[in-house]
Image: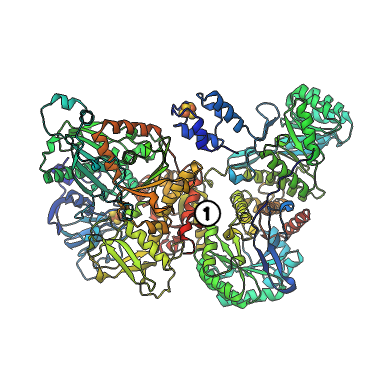
Amino acid sequence: MNRPESLLSLNESGSLKENMPLFKILFLPDKKQVFVSEKENLLQAARVAKIPLKASCGGEGVCRTCQLKVKEGIVRIKPAEYQPASIKPPGKDGEKNSEKSGLNIAITSYVLACQTFPLSDLTIEIPEAARLTKLQIITDYRDDYPTDNRDDYPANDQDKDKNVLLTEDMGYSALNGEEIISDPFKKKYYGLAVDLGTTTVVAELLDLTKGVSLAVKGTYNQQLSYGEDVISRLVYAQENENGRPYLQEAIVDSVNALINELTISRQVSPFEIRAVVCAGNPTMTLLFLGLDPAGLRFEPYTAAVHNPPTIQAQKAGLKIYPRATVKFVPGIANYLGGDVIAGVVATGMAARDELTLFIDVGTNGEMVLGNKEWLVACSCSAGPAFEGSGLKHGVLAIPGAIDSFKITSNLEVKYTTIDRLPSRGICGSGLISCLAGLYRFGIIDRRGKFNLPPDHPRLHMVNGEKEFVLVWATDTGINEDITISESEINNLIRAKAAVFAGIRSLLQFLNLSLENIDHLILAGGFGRYLNLKEAVAIGMLPDLPPQKYRYAGNSALKGAKMILFSAEARKKTLEITRKMMYLDLSEGNTFTEEFLAALFIPHTNQNLFPSLKGG
Amino acid sequence: MALTGLEIFKQLPQTNCKDCAFPTCLAFAVALASGKVTPEKCPHLSASARAMLTTAFAPPMALIKIGPPGQELVIGNETVLFRHEKRFEHAPGLAVLIKDNLPVAEITTKISYLSSVVFKRLGENYGLDLLALENCSGEPANFKKMVAVAIEKSNLPLILMSENPEAMAAVLSMAAQRKPLIYSAQSTNYQEMTGLAQKYNLPLAVKGKGLDELAALVEKITALGHEQLVLDTGARETSQVLFEQTQLRRLALNRFKPFGYPTIAFALDKDPIQSVVKAGVFLIKYAGIVVLTSDHPADLLSLITLRLNIYSDPQKPMAVESKIYPVGNPGKDAPVVITTNFSLTYYCVANDFEASRIPGYIIPVDTDGASVLTSWAAGKLTAEKISEALQNSGIAERVTHRKVIIPGGVAMLSKRLTGLSGWEVLVGPRESSGIPSFLKREWVP
Amino acid sequence: MPVKVIRENWPGKVNTITLGIGSQAIKIGGEGAFPFLAFEGKLPYRPVVACEVWDEEPGDWPDLLTAPFAGVIDEPAAWAKKCLVYGADLICLRLVGAHPGAKNKSPQECARMAQKVYAAINIPLIVVGCGEDEKDAAVLPAVAEALAGKNCLLGWATAENYRPITTACNNYGHSLIASSPLDISLAKQLNILITETGFNPGSIIIDPLVGALGYGLEYAYSIMERLRLSALTGDKMLAMPVICFVGQETWKTKEATISDFECPSWGEQARRAILWELLTAVALTQAGGAIMVLRHPETVRHFLAHLTSFI
Ligand code: SF4
Ligand code: FES
């Protein structure tokens, strides 16, 4: 699925301008070089160069995450009102500029990649802050919840029992029968379980004949440079003529990159991969398949996701055995996809008597409540706050990400980072920790408003907004103050409120209360570094005894793996989709009311948090 | 005690066959628990489950219809004391009292006028529901004349008011097919009145002096086999009516059988304004029919509006109408701000906009009452929708510029919106609290 | 057949608040039952009426509304006195002129005005700012100081500006109006925030930002019923009495302002507008409102007459 070279001069609306001069764009420090016309902005140029950039707003010029530095050359900047403050008006520094009608010509300056077009050959420097890749994704989700209950969960996880050999039934299931029969002497069958996430893509290489896992790798979903959340991708797919193929290519490329890494690391031939099971949310599933996702947003909301087709690898663009089957875990609703179903399979909650609440806090907060008799699911858009985006100093859980804070009573801020590297930003668990700390020491009030004297040294006014300095520039690995602003705090409070309100709405729907929950399972990369106490202290997770909490790691991947390994799991998956009911939170007023009540630290109704009383 | 969804679920076949038009048995169970469906919608119930659920979900208050099919007023079936618990099911009927001691000409004009009153609100027409015709002259002949006029001049359902069974029998011989409400059976005449109601199969108002007598009377009438009843405790003083109406409703919800019917209350006062006030109180607090004496259009308009407010469904997302809302006295160069029609969103925007003291226009786009981000996610706030709202609202005639401010949360729509509408799009703040400073900073027409 | 009436036993009640001092003081709140259901709980004080007086002559009031104040409408102290004649229990002075977009009067100027009006009436005074959070945060502390010890009611404290206003009310012994839009959680949150600054929750009055008849009245109605229910079931952070700015909402509706001539089928404006304000107040009183802030003297008269029907 490589983009043919001729596409380089296509602009995004797809029209090929003949004879349009092409400019050479050199990206530093990557030293990658591409040719584009004056009709293509630098964000597009970076995509061509396969350098994924942050572009949270998908190139609308409003999020300011795509700032690059023009080192050499002349560019045209779209006359937009939303340029970052750091852009100097043309001519300010006495640098050469010419006036074309309505154009700003700027050189040697920070620009928004999505609003900037070449007028000459360019040398561009990509600051770390604008970059998505080069960062290692944490994939070893098998660590348990970092409290005392470290027992693995669920007990029937395949990983526990690495000696299980592939039974005939399993092989049959995974390879669709036909393959084994037609090629009975072949020794090696590998499979690939894939978690197609909105932000990250994780794949696990499996030896199907031995029933063991060989390696896991993760990477960013390259679609990130088309917008950070599902909705912006959907919009991109709809509003741009080649939107769908671009997005499809981005995600398929991401998986291929993983296949490449995995097979090299275990010295396996990609062509020995005979079966793939993907678990993704509905949008990712549709975009991977190149299908029209319009039905996800617009009535009548029909979508192929409820039972996505099985296709062959070559059709999917995966560089493995061409006729390998690529299956998708089915979903049940437009906002509840195979990733969650796979998670439910992995946790085994649908087989238990006790009441389990399963929460996957990602870009969307999806949750499933139930037991062996019934299952109800919902999805509340928590927003991407916990994945670090939408915040100036938010990052994914990368090495160097701040994952916890300790604020002392004299407002000194201490913190820890992942892998103890110099801090680069704050990841989801760090944000929760930050919010808990800011509140505990009265730096913010229960609504998240700063409550400090205006001349406090850690309080800055930036663009008319209060920001609190968490880490001084000199202590960071990025050489700028790491801050959090009032509106960012507001975003976090909304995100945590959405999660809690989702939980309450689900329970209320069935007339249950928090005490009825026997197990609460957290899934997703988010939970890995989470401090449970702090998540409860801000009112994101219910105030239940810690022994009720479990951490399931990347349950989507685990579920996909189980489905790949066992026909039994496949059968259960279908049962689960049949049994599960989807609760649309936008119907009625319950969610809205619960949400407003949760926009408070920890909650408007403090009786819901008995352990925090008096604190 | 009401059954919960899970308790009901245990009684269901759990096959998720979807024959009830719900995706799963659980969805059906919860819908049943909240009164959105009735048990028989599941064709696969076991006999015992059916019996159990049917009794559990029998409404605590009877449904009563007054008037000919197609034009009838439907009241009763109420299930709550406070509208926020669920909703008030059936708006009470408003009736105007007409006495038969007036000259016929006057009666005729009055009836014609009352039958023609129409007010338009939120795109719907509302008017009076009933005519209450009172035989206060005591003369059956007058009564008959008045009823004859009403039958001829009006399509409204009728309340026939006389304590005299003969007078009642006489008018019923010509009015029965209009399915009027017979007012009233009292301790002195209940046998005859019940007989009439049964003969013509009509609803019957029962009037007792106070709760005790009323309950006793109802038991006697139901023992005679008539179940279409409307209750009147006889009280006319505001505080007594309020007390008794509250008790009637509470006891009905407690399944005290004799009070399981809708009620009728009379708003009578020497002072015409005070009688409207009384009617307002009775509308809110639990009457199924409110009878007033005044026929002034302002009285009817305000009471009809009050009734619409209180009897709206609080479970529906709170939404405002999608149209132009001016803030202050905007001129031709005033800013135009887009938001969604979720009330809370709209009110926040309106408040913050007002606080800026910059006059302008707000256009809430119809998003079925969803907030900005929710509706964006659900595709209900799209460039198409905004463009449509700009066009249909007629804002183009109110301002000379072509600039529209959209919420910061949906910045991504700007390009497409410009393309569709031809309006220049300014991306406003994400939070409504940012509106004043945004307008001060950025607004130049 | 004796019917066993249902009597709820409510564990909680609404806070009682005293406004004003000495013999002129007024008490509100204290209810231990739903409005007018005295058979199951104490309802010690009747709802009260406050009349609105502006520090600036209102530019956009219809003639119907300015006529009763002819000659005094540009003289707040005299206007306030006139309201007493019309039966007001208290006066609500509104500092419209403080708004930065209007006259942008200084906090001191506003404070002097409040003092002057208070001196003229000597009954409990409500003072509300111009509605712009930031300006109110500057104006109300000055007013609080000028009226020190007079036990007035000041507003509006919102989630944005509650700190300085709370501090001032605390220091100078006033009650305050906590105002949040149409949601019970938002109201409770603000009460908690205010209380956590050390303010006595017994001196808070809730303003749920009511809507007029036909304009969202039902939202406020249900929120107020829920507030009362919360108070009666013992939620201390929702046990505050409620103030309803009825006049302000009513007199921007079409129904109250449009003339007979423009819409004859709606009946005379004089009757229609009064009914609009009156029914809004009556409905909100049924939902548990304690202070009705009204504008037209006729409304005041009818409203007070209506209340006597419960005695
Ligand atoms: S019809 Fe009955 S059995 Fe079938 S899904 Fe509905 S409730 Fe379940
Ligand atoms: S500003 Fe958002 S991508 Fe460029």
Q: Is residue C250 above or below residue B119?
A: below
Q: Is residue B290 above or below residue C298?
A: above
Q: Find residue C88 and report its image quarter.
A: bottom right
Q: Is residue A458 left or right of residue A73?
A: right
For the residue pair C272 and C9, the one nearer the viewer reads as C9
Q: Is residue A79 left or right of residue B160?
A: left
Q: Is residue B376 left or right of residue B158?
A: left
Q: Find residue C200 and report its image quarter.
A: bottom right
Q: What amino acid is at disc 1? A: Tyr
For the residue pair A497 and B176, the one nearer the viewer reads as A497
Q: How is the image coloured?
A: rainbow
Q: Is residue B20 visible to the viewer in this orientation of the structure?
A: no
Q: Which residue is mark 1?
A: B347
Q: Residues within 10 Å of mark 1 (few under 14, many from 20)?
A: some
Image position, residue C130 (x, y; %): 57, 66
Q: Is residue C28 left or right of residue A408?
A: right
Image position, residue B261 (x, y; %): 71, 35
Label 1: which secondary element = helix
- Any atom of ligand 2 within 8 Å of the CB at mark 1? no
* Chain identifier of the residue bearing label 1 in the image: B
Q: Quadrant of the N terminus of chain A?
A: top left
Image position, residue B307 (x, y; %): 66, 43
Q: Is residue A228 visible to the viewer in this orientation of the structure?
A: yes
Report how many numbered discs are placed on residues in the image.
1
For the residue pair A132 and A62, the one nearer the viewer reads as A132
Image position, residue B58 (x, y; %): 62, 32
